[in-house]
Amino acid sequence: MTTKNLLVELFVEELPPKALKKLGQAFGIELVASLNAQNLISLRAETDDDQESTQFFASPRRLAVWVKDVLVQAPDKAVSQKLMPVAVGLDAAGSATPALLKKLQALGADASAVSGLKRVMDGKAEALFYESTAKGAMLAEGLQKALLEAIAKLPIPKVMSYQLESGCELPGWSSVSFVRPAHSLLALHGSEVVPISALGLKAGNSTQGHRFEAAKSTVVVADADAYANTLEKDGAVIASFEARKAEIVKQLAAAAAKVGGGVKPIEDDALLDEVTALVERPNVLICEFEKQFLDVPQECLILTMKANQKYFPMLDASGKLTNQFLVVSNISPADASAVIGGNERVVRPRLADAKFFFDQDRKKTLESRIPQLAKVVYHNKLGSQGERVERVRAIARAIGQQLGGDLLAKQADRAALLAKADLLTDMVGEFPELQGIMGGYYALNDKETPEVAAAVEDHYKPRFAGDELPRNQVGVVVALADKLETLVGMFGIGNLPTGDKDPFALRRHALGVIRMLVEKAPTLQIIDLIARSVPAFGSLIQDQSSALNDFIYDRFAGSLREQGYSAQEVDAVISLRPQKLAEVAQRLAAVRAFAQLPEAPALAAANKRVGNILKKVEGTVEAKINSALLQAGEEQGLADALKSVAARADSAWANGQFEENLKALAALKEPVDAFFDKVMVNHDDPAIRANRLGLLASLHQAMNRVADLSKLAA
């Protein structure tokens, strides 16, 4: 069948910038999926590139999709429909029953179709099947269905209801709902308009370009393939989100090179996506502000320029903020001085506010603000921020004492005392994202030690996956204490994550604790840390240490699988709940090396068998062997081999050589196999039976110090 390329565009008022990229992709994906489901897209070779066969467009005022090789009509399709069991549809003489005739009539067939019915075994009985040919969908009806489905499935958190303009398809006082009011619909199959409608609009071959710089007030698109070029030429709009983004990146780099001196715009993918969603034809301009504002911490200036103005601050070669910044304008006048001057005037009050907040905040010390934390509610079941600070202090002292003695405990206590005080400053009140960061600056201003100031700044770290960890041990202790207080407290009042809801970021806190224990505090043990944290709450909570311990190990397991370890490897190690999380990577490496040994499958299977035997025994089996009760040669052989292997394995274990510990177990394969081939564990004599169980318990203990090897069994 003949195919042509298809272009569909919805032209609307300005779309939400932070959602534009997602909306554009969802619109295109859903529309193409629906066309595919209706067989309206020609079958392509497996080597075809999806990017060459479809293209999504998203600009501030349009959502569009281009699809290659779309059919005018989908191919006819053979349909086989099950009617009923033969015994129900045919009588003893083989004639159609009334039930069968009624069913055929409902399908548009008559009694003449009975002879053409097929008999096919369906389970234990024969059934009658009616075979027919369904006409393929026409493009107009198929695209209409696809467009409505794509609109309905757009990820819009909140829709607008608006009155239709006069002259629309639905006259009178009709209204529709969409993310933003829609003004036109374009649908071209090659050069032909596809007669579809949506949101009160009929499809045509025209759209609108840039509000101010379009060469033509109405942009007429000759055919589907000419869409992007025509819109850019006549409409002054770069329709492709990715092409517009690439153009902005190119212009940002060119502007920075023009400034010289090794400066570069700040890298921020979220900001870049948002700005891409705000402009239709980007024009990057160089602006500047007064150097006096550089006395304010650069984090404040950067945040206000990015969050409030969508500007790109510029950093010098050492990463220090300069007084120049870049603006991505949506217009390109011959003389840009008015645009530059306007943006410079707009940013000045923002920076002045930041300077004012910074100067005012420094008039009071952090310590003087602490009593006011008693008036700030943290959680209705866990009290105020002031009470929370005292709990964090108690936990920090305990961890600091364990990790570094009196000095570290004292420093951690001081940092924990001051850590939340910046919540009451004007700067953090205006920019909550700066909590901790401003605390560090204000602590230095108050003449606190550099170690304490750094800990105040770092105690929220890591804030997200891949974030930096605290720089010094004081920061590590306070960050651990802060996250453990949250975890223990929330678990203690039953406020746990459910599904994708995690309002207190407990999953992130757990991963932060894991990273710090692995990378910064390898000697600390997780169950001990949780136990040290619970007393700080007194009678406010129920002790949920066991559930919290499981939660943390579950997060750790998930993280390890994301790093490329297999589910078997991770389960083998994590199921033993190793307390020193820093050892886990080494244990995983040892398990992976052990799995490559030829003896590994048999030993893993034997280990699983031993575990199952021991589980069935009532009471506790002591890992103890009485040599005088060993009877069979294979029984004695296993005991001797275990004694020999245990010496080497214990030595390797004591020296932290996990791989050597597991490799030593390879010598047990043959005696273990022989034992299970020749020895009956459940001997009639209770003493012999207990001794054999003790032998197996000793074997199980020796084999499962690094990991539970039964998890490797097929």
Image (cartoon, rainbow, N blue to C red):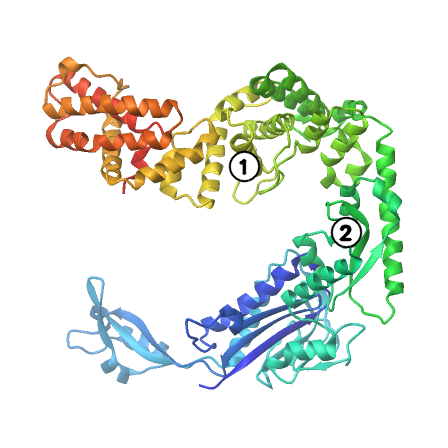
Residue 368, image quadrant: top right
Residue 576, image quadrant: top left
Mark 2 vs mark 1: give the one in front.
2
Mark 2 and mark 1 lie on one chain; the one further toward the N terminus is: 2
Q: How many marks?
A: 2
Residue picked out by circle 2:
313
Q: Position of residue 46 (x, y in %)?
A: 41, 71
Identify which residue, 492 or 174, lies in the foreground: 492
Identify the residue shown where x is 37% and y is 30%.
658
- SS for dot 2: strand
Which quadrant would the N terminus be assigned to in this image?
Answer: bottom left
Left or right of 660 in this view: 185: right
Say above or below: 197 vs 293: below
Which quadrant would the C terminus be assigned to in this image?
Answer: top left
Q: Position of residue 655 (x, y in %)?
A: 39, 24
Left or right of 363 in this view: 80: left
Identify which residue, 262 or 70, lies in the foreground: 262
Identify the residue shown where x is 50% and y is 24%.
523
State the mark number for residue 511: 1
Identify which residue, 309 or 256, lies in the foreground: 256
Label 2 is placed on what type of residue?
Answer: Pro
Identify the residue shown where x is 84% and y is 43%.
294
